[in-house]
Image: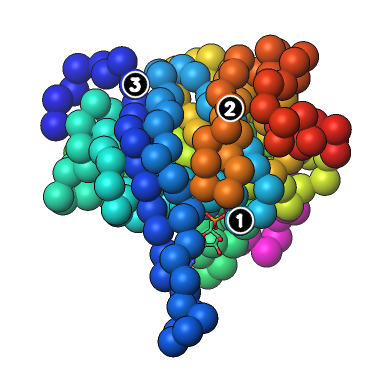
Amino acid sequence: MTDVRPAHVLEINNVSVTFKSGAGASRRTIRAMNDITLAVAPGETLGLVGESGSGKSTSANVALGLQKPDSGEVKILGNPFPRRRRQLAGKLQAVLQHPAWSLNPRRKIGESVREPLTVSRRSLTREAQHARVRDLLDRVGLDPALAERYPHELSGGQRQRVSVARALITEPQFIVFDEAVSALDVAVQAQILQLIRTLQADHQFGALFISHDLGAVKQVADRVAVLFRGDLVETAETAEFFRAPQHEYSQRLLAAL
Ligand SMILES: Nc1ncnc2c1ncn2[C@@H]1O[C@H](COP(=O)(O)OP(=O)(O)OP(=O)(O)O)[C@@H](O)[C@H]1O
């Protein structure tokens, strides 16, 4: 992999993904992604919106290299996914809807935040790693003393801040946020979204922000891409999208907001 800064941290070119479901006569093909092309630049957040079943999670999985497309091309940090994922360790991170999925309940918060470093920055001393954990907890607005606590001792909003700290600790170039604030109440959501913006201004990571919640996307995204039944029906600058959505489906989504 080259370490030259690529023009795009993620490129999805003409990607299609289909699934087969059912059996016998009721067996059918589902087009989860239909000839999708999109890209995310360094320092940019692309909001990906659409109703349930429109292909958002499939797109997230493709962007993370967890789902192979049937056709088309995916480039991460300017290159195809390497055969050995370890080469991407620390450069690509994900923040998911439920922090419980990324935080081990039996592991102290500090250890969960430190873990990505132990994979990608093994040369850092333990002391340096712990110092980075404290620094990151502080950056996401948490008391570094929380490092000694367990996930069940934190609120939902605190746990999601921990997930953000864990995702950022390796200074990744690209982060996928998949419904990352959807489980939080609106006030906590707004804080986390503001936090993402601030950290992005400092770190210049590119982000794919996936949400069914247009309000969240409006707060955090630079551009918006709209999926409808596996088709990408519109891509626009966020302000432009909310001012004058072009596609009829986008107009309906906005009206529902
Ligand atoms: N592993 C799978 N096997 C069969 N069908 C699948 C599979 N994964 C997704 N699908 C189908 O592909 C389509 C897109 O699903 P996807 O999960 O990407 O949508 P989504 O926009 O993320 O929905 P939600 O907001 O409900 O999570 C849906 O029709 C879904 O049923």
Could you tell me residue 163's position as x and y percent? 55, 46
**Quadrant of the drawing holding the N terminus:** top left
Q: How is the image coloured?
A: rainbow
Confirm whether residue 176 shows in the render: yes
3 or 1: mark nearer the eye: 1
Q: Nearer the viewer, mark 3 or mark 2?
A: 2
> In the rendered image, which residue does mark 3 sit on?
8
- Drawn side of residue 12 relative to residue 147, left or right: left
Q: Is residue 66 visible?
A: no
The residue pinned by badge 2 equals 234
- Which mark is drawn over residue 162? none
Q: Which residues are magenta?
A: 150-157
Q: Residues within 10 Å of mark 2 (few under 14, many from 20)?
A: some
Of pointers 2 and 1, the one earlier in the residue sequence: 1
Q: Check disc 3 and report its element: helix, strand or loop.
A: loop
Q: Does mark 3 have its CB less than 8 Å from ligand 1?
A: no
Q: Give the amino acid type for the residue marked by disc 2 in the picture.
A: Glu
Badge 1 amino acid: Gly
Residue 99 drawn at (x, y percent): 59, 55
Q: CA distance from mark 2 to mark 1?
A: 17 Å
Q: Is the residue under label 1 in contact with that under label 3 (CB below 8 Å)?
A: no
